[in-house]
Image (cartoon, rainbow, N blue to C red):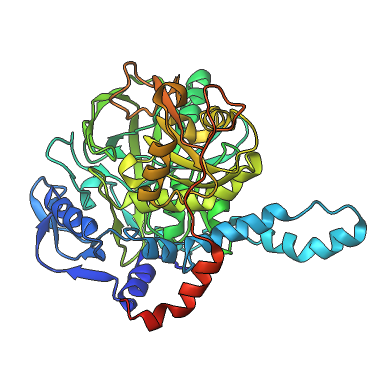
Amino acid sequence: MYHSLKDFVQFLESKNELLRIREPLRAELELTEVADRVVKKGGPALLFENVIHRGPDGKDKKSEFPVLMNMYGSEQRMAWALGVESVEEIAKQIEELLKTKPPSGFMEKLKMLPELVKLASFTPKSVSRGAGVNHPCQEVVIDPPNLYRLPIPKCWPGDGGPYITLGNVITKDPETGIRNVGLYRIQIFDEKTTAMHWQIHKVGSRHFDKYKEIKKKIDVAVFLGGDPVLTYAGSAPLPDMMDEILFAGFLRKKGFEMVKCKTIDLEVPADADFVIEGFVDPTESPVKEGPFGDHTGYYSLTDNYPLFHVTAITHRKEAIFPSTIVGPPPMEDAYLGKATERIFLPLLRTTFPEIVDMHLPIEGAFHNLAIVSIKKGYPGHARKIMHSLWGTGQLMFTKCVVVVDHDVNVQNLKEVTWHLTANLDPKRDFLFSEGATDALDHASPTFGVGSKIGIDGTRKWKDEPGCREWPDVIQMSPEVKTKIDALWTKLGIK
């Protein structure tokens, strides 16, 4: 559990997983070039301590704040950010919770009380500012608010401007009051206005639409930093009705303290490093946002998005400004995606118990390719899984679904390639469909709608159309394997 980015930086430094860079570097492009080279080499987290950026007067100045990049940029650092040694530990915890049967009698309910109390402790707790009390995220008030006080990078040459890339955007449903936290990019226009990149499929966009119907301004808070588990939770594909702050509390096994914003009716984590408060007016005309060098490895093009007006900026003392870059993979965000793949697999299995494992290759940029292994139970089973995944949460965006048998290690692309191509007849085993595509998908012929392909790489059963007798995979007899195992060291083979 970490109370600030400074805590996490100190932890990473103790593990020799942090590099402090004291050479002066510009927030425009130069931070990106360093971080891009480091992440592609599997290097450490980077703390830039001498960042030059455009100041409030329009002139270059040294930033008041260091910039942290690549903190999630390995499987190990990603696990540490979530407070564990391996992300698989969280998957196992979720699996155990899912196995818990509802109590049928009074005694069973009593036995479950300790677990229920433990879960209740993950709930966010409101804390009062009180007279003279300043919680960490509000220790310093930037007055008047000015975004140019922050070292916000411009990542790529073709970008429309500087972008906040690790901002957790908080909105509240006007009907239910349920909070949403989403990780949305934010393009800076001037000291007090930005674009708000609410993609059409995101919860923030749905909240915006509801406020548009009632012609009311929507309060928006953006927080950066604090416990790194918060930013992961903001990226997680949770259902609309689930609070990301609660999910973050579950991950770190302790609820977060929340403090009321100074100028709007929202709460933010008290331990955040920065908070940007403001509003979006749905009656205003949208603004041109972009281009932006995106996680697809291509620029997402200019489009219309709402205008965000800043009303306050606060930060903790000794705050660290977090940022990330996306672009041609692999990038730091790949490890956020891999964590989601592992953590949410048990939940996927509750609906589709035949699924053994799933792999979303980094090079597939999350939504382009999913490889799934299943315990096949009947003819056409692979096609059922394809259709099912295209109807499940953010997996609906997946352009290509490959299904293989349960004994294929989907994490090993060499093994997948062998079994897939050996079992494949393209005419019989390709399934074409259509559906929703990610808003960033430039290849779809229409915005947000495109074609899908499913590939059945399973061994075919005799009851499936167009199948002859299917051969067995070559395997050595167990007796011989056991004998050679025992003799292996004597054979002198290295």
- Extreme top residue here? 446
Q: Is residue 366 left or right of residue 28?
A: right
Seen from the viewer's position, the closer of residues 240 and 298 is 298
Residue 89 lies in what quarter of the image? bottom right
**Which residue lies at the image location 56% right of the left edge and 57% below the top edge?**
91
Seen from the viewer's position, the closer of residues 438 and 425 is 425
Give x and y (percent) for residue 369. Answer: 39, 37
The image shows a total of numbered marks equal to 0
When the figure is inspected, residue 89 is found, relative to residue 325, above or below; the finding is below
Give x and y (percent) for residue 14. Answer: 33, 78
Seen from the viewer's position, the closer of residues 438 and 155 is 438
Mark yes or no: residue 105 visible. yes
Quadrant position of the C terminus in the picture: bottom left
Residue 51 lies in what quarter of the image? bottom left
Mark yes or no: residue 260 visible. no
When the figure is inspected, residue 404 is found, relative to residue 12, above or below; the finding is above
